[in-house]
Amino acid sequence: MVISNPAHSEKPTVSARSIHKSFGSNEVLKGIDIDLYPGEVLALVGGNGAGKSTLMKILMGIYQADSGRLFVDGVETKINKPSIALANGIYLVPQEPMLFPNMSVEENIIIGFNENKAELRNRLKDTIQTLGWELDLKRKALTLSIAEQQLVEILRGLMRKSKLLIFDEPTSSLTFNEVEALFTMINLLRQQGLSIIYITHRLNEVFQIADRVVIMSDGLITLNAPVEEVNHEILVRGLLPTNIEYQENKICSIDINRECKPIFEVNQLTGYGFSNISFKVYPGEILGIAGIVGAGRTELVTSIFGKDDIINGKVILDGEDITGLSTHEVMSKGLSYVPEDRFLNGMFRISSVAENTTASSVDSLGHIALNKKREKEITNYFIDTFRTRVTGCEQEMGSLSGGNQQKVVIGRSIATKPKLLILDEPTRGIDAAARADVYAIINKLRQDGMAILIISSDMEEIVELSDRVLTMYSGQIVAEFNREDVNHDSLMAAAFGIVGGKV
Amino acid sequence: MNVANNGKQSKLKRTLNKLLHARELTSIIFLVLMFAVVGIINSNFLSVSNLTLSLNSSVVYTIVAIGIALVIITGEIDVSVGATLGMAASISATMVRDGSPTWLAFSAAILVGALIGLINGIGVSILKVPSIIMTLGVNSIVRGLIYVYTDGKWVENLPFDFKTISQSKLPGTGITLIYFSVIVIAIIVHLFLNRTQRGKYFAAVGDNEGGATLLGIPVNATRLSAYVICGVFSAIGGVLYASRVGFVTPISGNGYEMKVIAACVLGGVSMAGGVGTVIGASIGSLIMASISRVLVFIGLSSDYDNTITGCLLIIIVVFDAVMQRRNAVTARHERLRARTGNVNLGGIK
């Protein structure tokens, strides 16, 4: 195919030069250069937090880059809102459908067009016919299944006469036939000279549809090559963080007695977002659950924690059945959960460090009046042992750095003296020093005999901390590794659904 | 021939189906039931004169409800409509009393209404003040200004010509010309919202703001114009009020915001935004206007009027909210279930 020739004869449709973007102190894009050529399908792959979505949102004008330049057809263009991106022929098919639930399918697709309605309708019917999709245009969007919603989003993108069409994981909930039809359509658009970015977690699709592959990792492009020059192995390797240091100061291994009774047991558990999950956690053991975002890990633990319904199966904590209990009851039985998103679920921003530390164990502070002295004692204990940097236990939680906030939140969970501690993305968005402190805390808890369940998208973290690792993909456990055989490559491959090293 | 016939039939069927599933249907049934039940208790209620009176007396509610419906459809709220109405009534009444021609008084009132709407709109869509706070503040400011403007006095002795505007009837019927005009306005606004590209932006903004932004829909401009139109319609309501009642007091229009919000909700306009029509809001207004008359006819004190309005409002909003929460949970579960796919455990070739 001529198009995949790296020596492009045409000018790029859209170019980006040294794009930088930070959110607070977290640098998400560290200088991205990319050229998108007409008639080329570029597959963009990368782990969670690699910066793919941020880059796409910058192209679409939803975010603005801190520095860097964008060119459309060779002309420098400031894209600071979506309407400018649309006027320049750039369209993003978002990962999560953004439909108008109370409008019909047809209204959803043709809204925002300034063309003749009858003409639009005909074009829409032609497009659907070419695709061979079955979609009732009169139905309201809220009655559509998620896959159908995704079809509508894709149709919106196809109806726009775009120069650059971006698909952000379009196939995550489509059936095989629908995916085939989409690929046929993408091939058609490629022949018409459109430039296409195709983001995916399914590495197979890269070889099916792409002309060129770009791998992003940790805010940088680590690979940019024609698809003929790569294979599965290179892709998986490219997804790893750029500077892996195998720190041999891994947690000292303790002999875990797996003969004794497990402290925590999940038996064929099925709920919304996961199915048929079974595992055991022993006292003093750290069990890691790896997987990409959307694999169902958070849904699994929040359901265990009583925040959503369990359809089938059993959860047993220290010999007691805690299936389907409310969050409050689950906590009182001895299970504690540190949520993924501190800001949303984990902390009280305008309360003091002391109030945040004791918020979960407030019952132990006296029944009528709160014992302020006891509150201070507990708080100071955790500040000392966790080396939390605060001015005092009355400091406002919101004024702490991310790492110190996380220490306080972990302290709060431990103050309830749980039998099992669940940590969901314990070090997301915190700096290296704080990360080391958090690891030390986790290590100490484990030596004290606490059972710990860690969920993380950061493979390095999982490898460093876990005694045993389960990998989830599409809501199911696809692989289990012991400490001896766990490594980045096998873990990453399993997280992307490739099991048994067969690549 | 046969095929064409079939096509027609299915179109008829579709239209019928659409009618049956419209949210407005519930309000029409409510309206009919209310009239039927009261009619059984007191047959005078169903007399032609009472029915036309019910229609005519709902005119002020209807025009203001059309305006506020636009704001609610974009997902916001405006509680300053009662004050805007009072201000417009005071201005137009003093002007005609002091000898200005009606058209000038009408124009001045509309200008003031538009200005109040503009201030609300800038506060909510540009400065991002929560709409309840912004319009509550503006409500208070305008109420205060009415006292300043009128010196706290009633505006009375309005010229006969001005008062007859609201009395003249459509030839051969008991329906007033102004009610007829307001219905025409409702139909025009309805067509604008449902048949034009710009009009559809209103529901889009209220339905999914993020999605609207992504499609390049001017979210702020749409909200701003909803507030301006609402201000203008409230002002028209104020002039009609002055003409109908014949005098204006500093507290004229007090509590109208509550009545018209209830009218919208009764007419199937969702407080969450994105759903509802001005036709529904008009039907709701008719119900609201009839409730106080109903109370009289079934022999209850009209003191219950506000209490009943409040109860109806809460019942419907709570019902709506519960349904929406249920739908959201179902949608989330469905999405999660779709993700839980079949994993190819054999690896990839």
Image (tube, coloured by chain):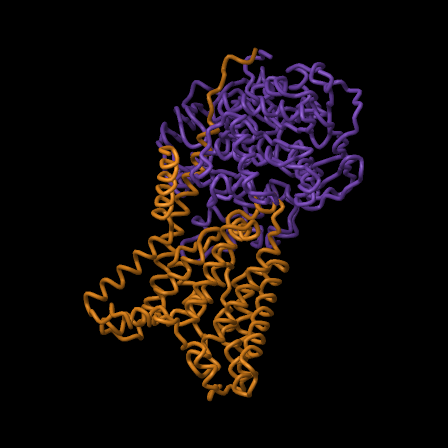
Chain colours: A purple, B orange
Answer with the quarter of the image where residue B44 lies.
Answer: bottom left
Front-most of residues A451 and B285: B285
Q: Looking at the rendering, in which quadrant would you find the C terminus of chain B?
A: top right
Instruction: Give me the residue at 50% from left, 73% from top.
Output: B83
Foreground pick, A196 / B127: A196
Q: Quadrant of the N terminus of chain B?
A: top left
Which residue is more in the foreground, A255 or A324? A324
Q: Position of residue A141 (x, y in %)?
A: 46, 40
Q: Quadrant of residue B277?
A: bottom left
Q: Looking at the picture, does residue B118 appear above or below residue B193?
A: below
Can you give x and y, in whole percent of width and height, for residue A434 in the image? 66, 38
**In the image, residue A167 above or below residue B219:** above
- Percent x, y of residue B154: 47, 86
The mark total stands at: 0
Q: Which residue shows up at 27% across the image and 71% down it? A: B295
- Name above or below for residue A262 compared with residue B133: above
Judge from the rendering whether residue B319 lies leftward or rightward of residue A443; answer left or right: left
User: Outermost residue toward the front?
Assistant: B1
Position in image of residue B6 (x %, y %): 36, 35
Residue A437 in sight from this viewpoint:
no
Is residue B123 at least partly visible in the picture?
A: yes
Q: Residue at x 69, y 42 (%)?
A: A87
